[in-house]
Amino acid sequence: MSAKAEAALAKGAEEAAQEFSAEEEIDYVSYGGEQHLPLVMKLVDEELSEPYSIFTYRYFVYIWPNLTFLAFHMGKCVGTVVCKMGEHRSTFRGYIAMLVVIKPYRGKGIATELVTRAIRVMMESGCDEVTLEAEVTNNGALALYGRLGFIRSKRLYRYYLNGVDAFRLKLLFPRPDPSIDTFPSTEERAFNEVPETSQRQSLTYYG
Ligand SMILES: CC(C)(COP(=O)(O)OP(=O)(O)OC[C@H]1O[C@@H](n2cnc3c(N)ncnc32)[C@H](O)[C@@H]1OP(=O)(O)O)[C@@H](O)C(=O)NCCC(=O)NCCS
């Protein structure tokens, strides 16, 4: 594609993004089959530094289709998250492999919603924790995951092919104590209205 055509396309996305304001205008869907694969691959290939082969994508989306989500605006795929889960040592662990939102749509809470949906499925499936790696220089991703309650558990030296170190981030789910009824009802939660920031951070408790 010529640079001019690319610029025109980018302008189209920019304008579409400006029209969008309300969160409900974005459609979130879980991986629905082969028609979604090129959409996921395009976004990740364009935005993440690490190259992935088609086998890697297929590994994730075929085994855990319920842990890949796509965000659409006016029929265009504008974001995606790709995850898996399974036994890891003595835990059952969720893992966020890829997360991307295209530039014109950033800063509107789309990544937060994608990740929150994946984490909810992990929680409901009995995961004890969720992990991922992020480049130590990726301030946006580190801030996003920090807001969701992730902590930095390790620094991995030259983890990426580009030579950059990674932080391993971890979100621990509290083990439920069956003797204590700590899960508040919808009414209780509404009554105890908490600020937006705390709501996001309390994901670990309320899913
Ligand atoms: C990181 C990324 C997925 C964020 O997507 P997004 O939809 O803009 O994220 P959200 O709107 O949900 O952001 C939620 C919070 O994360 C933080 N955040 C996100 N991007 C940020 C940035 N560039 N700088 C600082 N904080 C940022 C903010 O606290 C933000 O909340 P606020 O807007 O109320 O301040 C997106 O920038 C992206 O695709 N980047 C390239 C790919 C990438 O780095 N993926 C992550 C790999 S680990």
Image (spheres, helix red, strand yellow):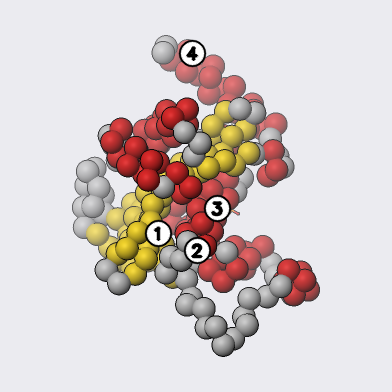
Numbered tag placed on residue 5 in the rendering: 4
Q: How far apart are the two marked residues, 4 and 1, measured between alpha carbons?
A: 40 Å
User: What residue is at 54 percent from the left and 16 percent from the top?
Assistant: 8
Quadrant including the C terminus: bottom right
The x and y percentages for residue 79 are 51, 38
Secondary element at tag 1: strand
Q: Which of marks 4 and 2 is nearer the N terminus?
A: 4
Q: How far apart are the two marked residues, 4 and 3, measured between alpha carbons?
A: 35 Å
Q: Where, by quadrant of the figure, is residue 198 drawn?
A: bottom right
The x and y percentages for residue 84 are 38, 52
Q: Where, by quadrant of the figure, is residue 171 drawn?
A: bottom left
Say which amino acid is labelled 1: Gly
Secondary element at tag 3: helix
Numbered tag placed on residue 123 in the rendering: 2
- Cβ–Cβ under 8 Å for marks 4 and 3: no
Q: Earlier in the sequence, mark 3 or mark 2?
A: 3
Which class describes the residues within 10 Å of circle 4: few (<14), some (14-19), or many (20+)? few
The x and y percentages for residue 20 are 68, 35
